[in-house]
Image (spheres, rainbow, N blue to C red):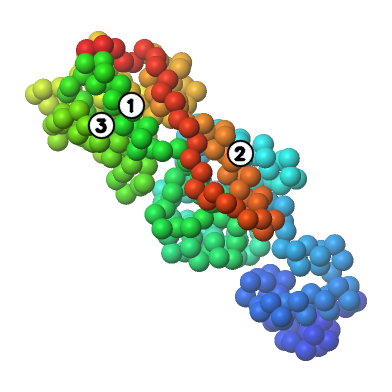
Amino acid sequence: MVAIKDVAKKANVSTATVSRALSKPESVSKKTLEKVLNVIEEMQYLPNASAQQLRMSRTKSVLVVVPDITNTFFSKVVRGIESVASEFGYQIVLGDVHKRSEMNVKFFEQLHQKKSDGMILLTSNVDADAIRQLSQRYPIVLACEYVVGLNIPTVSINNIKSSCEAVDYLVQLGHRRIGTITGPQDSVLGKDRLEGFLRSLAKHQLEVDPMHIQEGDFLYEQGYECMKRILLCETLPTALFVANDEMAFGAINAIREANLKVPEDISIISFDNIKFASIFSPSLTTISQPAFEIGRTAMKYMIQLMNKEEIEEKHYILPHKLIIRESVQQK
């Protein structure tokens, strides 16, 4: 049998170099890697098919990093990704960061170790410099969010514009005391949706009580806790823009516990249009994101990157839609 030392001798490299060429090919120079792989094929140290796969660096899998897999919005995005991936013979590998930024390194290693051919990020809560460097060597697509100054393919809606339109709708219904439960302000979605809220108020020359602005984290529990704090105010808002549906559910339940009603006492408008938004009582008026199409578009970008095709429009904005249901009424 051909041993690794035989390959090393014929390629005129060390056995450690051959080992790295097989396990961490990015750590070996292109010239050396080519030489080692040629010898591997020639000496049949690995089956020809395996050597060819190493040469092409194709695993036929794509890593999809999700901020919270329990959120049904991201589940729908992932289904969109998978629908295109399967068309091209790829499988997807899920990674759930759940706000643990230290986990980023583990997922980045998936690329370094050639365990995935590319990565689709559904969160911008990552080290921008690390992503910038990785994107120079590996196919990376960012979906749902964006990172300022990062020149990689991005798919999202316009969160500022859509949030502004949601609050405009409340104003059209006669509401003047409007509050908000924001997303985390260290995230681009949290910042953009708050920016849209403030732009609408400024446009209509409305002021907001600082206590009517509470920062949440996109989870049900924080929607509930933020609403409890707003309910302590002497004067309550007549309407609330909540940065996502999950927090809106929590806010509505807090309002109910205070013996108030939605929308009779406080109207609620939110964001995402997850499936439960139409089932919840009252059903939510919400901004709908085309989650499935976001996923499909992101995977199409990934296929283009892996095939080294030119991408003309790197920042693709998909349309949003205001879905009017029961949680909002005329003031």
- Say whether residue 73 is visible: no
Kind of residue at badge 3: Ser
**SS for dot 1:** helix
Circle 1 residue = 166
Viewer-side residue, 326 vs 43: 326
Which quadrant is home to the C terminus? Answer: top left
For label 3, count other residues whose C-alpha is less than 10 Å away and answer few (under 14), some (14-19) or many (20+): many
Pointer 3 or 2: first along the chain:
3
Taking depth in this image into account, of 39 and 5 the one nearest to the observer is: 39
Q: In this view, does 68 lie above or below 186?
A: above
- CB of mark 1 within 8 Å of CB of mark 2? no
Image coords of residue 22 (percent x, y): 72, 71
The residue identified by callout 3 is 200
| Separation of marks 3 and 2 at Cα, in angstroms | 31 Å
- Work out which quarter of the rendered image holds the N terminus and state it: bottom right
Q: In the rendered structure, are the residues bearing label 3 and label 1 in contact, judged by CB atoms less than 8 Å apart? A: yes
In this view, 116 is above or below 217: below
Instruction: Characterize the local packing of mark 1: few (<14), some (14-19) or many (20 or more) Cα atoms within 10 angstroms.
Output: many
Instruction: Name the residue at the left extreme.
Output: 234
Along the polypeptide, which appears first: circle 3 or circle 1?
Answer: 1
- The secondary element bearing badge 2 is classed as helix
Residue drawn at x 39%, y 54% as measured from the top left: 148
Looking at the picture, does residue 69 appear above or below residue 274? Answer: below
Residue type for callout 1:
Ala
State the CA–CA distance, disc 3 to disc 1: 9 Å
Element assignment for label 3: helix
Towards the viewer: 100 or 169: 169
Residue corresponding to mark 2: 296
